[in-house]
Amino acid sequence: MILFLKFTIYLFSLPFFIGVPANTADVTSVAPPGLHSQSLEIFTPRPGQVYTDDFEDEKEAGSPSPWIENNKHNYWNIAREGANNVYRVKSNEVSTWSWLHVFERDVTFDVRFKVAEVAKEDAELKFAVRFNDYEALVYLGYNFKTEKWYLAEQRGKDFEEVVFEQVINSKREVEPLKTDVWYHIRVLSENETVTVYINDMTRPKLWATDVRHQSPGRVALGAYNATVDFDDVALNLRSGQGRVNEGVLEYTIGDDDRFREGASIVEKSNGDLLLLHRSEEFHSSDQGETFTGPFPFSWPKNAHGHHSVLRLKSGKLLNMVAERAGKGQGARFRAKLSSDDGATWVDGGVTWEAYREGLPGKSEVIVMNDKLTQVPNGRIFFVVPVRKDDGEKITGHKTEIYYSDDEGKTWNQSKNDSDDFTEINRYAEGKVIQTSKGTLRLYTPWNTAHSVRYSVSRDNGETWKGDFALDKLRNSRSSFALIQDMYAPRTTFYMVWVFNNTFDTDIVFLPRSRLGLARSYDGIHWEYMMDVERWISPARKDRRVITQILDPSLTATDKYLYVTIGRSDRAGESGHNHQRLRFYRIEKSRLEPYPAWPTEF
């Protein structure tokens, strides 16, 4: 009875669920000839909020640029069906998905589809929203064996899949799917409710009212043991926060399920990619389409967990490696240089002579990945966070800045460190760049500040002053990466960082749910380009969220930006849970800035 009453409410509030107020909806009925004989309603409440795809601008047998599938699969391609293009998944014995790189919680997802072949009795068909991973999603499924539709969700690997109980009026019972017949599906998600329409867009067929997976996520199409054609996709991004990003490839590196976080990618002279992760490496000879490995580490031993490597203006590789005294944790950093893409190395100088010891079992210094910069006059900067303690526990951190004018043969320290120019006293990574005005900026995301901050040097890094906030670049944790794109025709900087609101800590500890990408043409003013990753997950009993984004790296080549992160996909013994190494390849030519900065975090 309760479900029936809720159903009645859905019928009366249908315009709201479509995504716009009843008096403002702009509904266009599209009925192209031939294959597209069934009309498709496309809802356009505001420009920029609707993504449509009829695949007509794609080449046969190709992969449409906005759509992504497992990089080791090739099941999804453009096919010709009469006078029209369709997006076809071939029958296979692997449950396979194709998705759009977009992060939105509340959507209206319209798709037309036709089942061409059912290869086996246990075949399935799926349409997903809030798709964060294969085990974190909300989806509409069709079981060909039982000939039934169902709604299900899973909140991550730590949770069981939940199939929602359905009470369907017999007069609205959905007939079993037939082959070679076109159907129109609409999946509408709003807060805790998901509603499904099939062909008749005025009368919902299925619904769920207690959906618990509440993260913004991708939308996806899925199939198993069936050949299915899809067409006329219409996606209404109802909050206006998300955006479909084209030219993105994303996947997890490593099939062994090992804990991995914090990598660095080096482009070799021949265009191959070398990914360094702690004491292992991965190789790519196809511009990041795939990586092989892990392989034993072939570069000089780095006694620190993270790597900082930079291609110098001379063409040499500069590699800062940590050296330790015996079995102790005291560390110093030595420059290593290579003129042959890492085949051989020569020693440079050390940042300091003594091995700096901290509390028992800890080094006094801790450096995250990729914290080297070379500015136009050739000076190289290396930013080093330092732990502070009271003899018993760590009480905070500060940032020290080192520089070299001879490609790392000798090093000097700036005359002051962050203790002199800020009162903030918590771990921070840092990166130095030179702005278009010729001044230097030390960009620093602090754990206890509400946004990315910067300090300024007007004497080429000898001294630093000021502690200025960039309010738009909100952050709650210190993980970030910042580079200058040396391939760009004009001065161009890119930054990725954990784009969260510090005040969310009232809800969970360590919010690390979103990675943003920003661009600057002067090192001063920044524009928001895209969400690289977003996944709001449940928290453990200690209020630490299960999914955390850590230690991003950022590399630019002629055509692509490469981003890596550690992303935990389930709970673990570490405070950062079970981290997996995620990889993103982004076509620079497809990047378009947001008209305004996002206002949700």
Image (tube, rainbow, N blue to C red):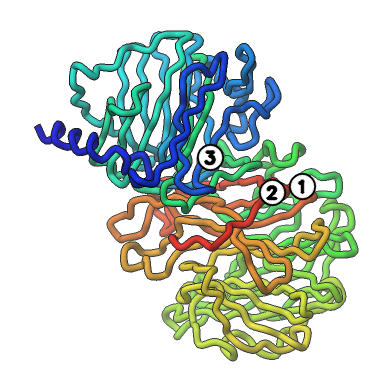
In this rendering, the label closer to the viewer, 3 or 1: 3
Q: Amino acid at mark 1?
A: Lys
Q: Which of these two is toward me, 109 or 577?
A: 109
In this rendering, the label closer to the viewer, 1 or 2: 1
Crowding near the residue tagged with mark 1, few <14, some 14–19, many ≥20 C-alpha atoms within 10 Å: some
Q: Which residue is mark 3?
A: 51
Which disc number belongs to residue 275?
2
Q: Secondary structure at mark 1?
A: loop
First in sequence: mark 1 vs mark 2: 2
Q: Which of these two is toward me, 436 or 358?
A: 436
Q: In 3D space, how far apart are the residues under numbered discs 3 and 1 (Cα atoms)? A: 25 Å
Crowding near the residue tagged with mark 3, few <14, some 14–19, many ≥20 C-alpha atoms within 10 Å: some
Task: Decide if residue 375 is on the left or right side of residue 323.
Answer: right
Asked if the residue under mark 2 is in contact with the one under mark 1, i.e. CB atoms within 8 Å, the reply is no
User: What's the residue at 51%, 44% (across, down)?
Assistant: 102
Residue 167: x %, y % from top left: 18, 25
Residue 519: x %, y % from top left: 66, 62
Q: In 3D space, how far apart are the residues under numbered discs 1 and 2 (Cα atoms)? A: 18 Å
Q: Amino acid at mark 3?
A: Tyr
Q: Amino acid at mark 2?
A: Leu
User: From the viewer's perspective, is residue 544 above or below residue 429?
Assistant: above
